[in-house]
Amino acid sequence: MSIRAINWARKTCSAFGVPAQHRLALFALCFFHNDKTGECFPSYDSIATDIGYGRRKTIDLVRDLEANGLVMIQTRRAGGHQGSNQYVLFGKPIGRKWADRVN
């Protein structure tokens, strides 16, 4: 768990107007963030369990965070198979207010 990541998320969510369900997903990512190494790679299932949403909803929430510039998702492969994603926190919001992702 990274206190620095949690403090960043608190300030960013308040200033940017991040909706509550997206805040849950962001805070869950902060709990998985290792401040010493910068690593953060929980599975969608782990995040979903922590925030109480299904896997599909969790994927959408995390992608919305990425679309708004708060996190960057890097896919990881292990032995030719999809591994859990690496999440880079401490992004700068795109724009001044939260924008819903347009599919």
Image (spheres, rainbow, N blue to C red):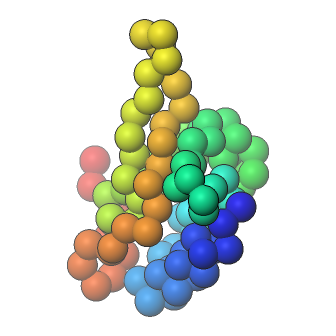
Q: Nearer the viewer, residue 52 or 86?
A: 86
Quadrant position of residue 42: top right
Quadrant position of residue 3: bottom right
Q: Tell me, yes or no, if residue 62 can be seen here.
A: no
The residue lying furthest to the front in this view is: 36
Indicate whether 27 appears above or below 50.
below
Residue 64 percent location from the top left of the image: 40, 57
Residue 66 percent location from the top left of the image: 37, 56
The residue lying furthest to the bottom in this view is: 15
Left or right: 48 in relation to 37: right
Residue 100 percent location from the top left of the image: 35, 65
| Residue located 24% across and 78% down the image | 95
Residue 40 percent location from the top left of the image: 56, 49
| Residue located 56% across and 53% down the image | 37
Q: How many marks?
A: 0
Left or right: 96 in relation to 56: left
| Residue located 40% across and 46% down the image | 73
- Position of the N terminus, as image quadrant, is bottom right
| Residue located 75% across and 51% down the image | 50
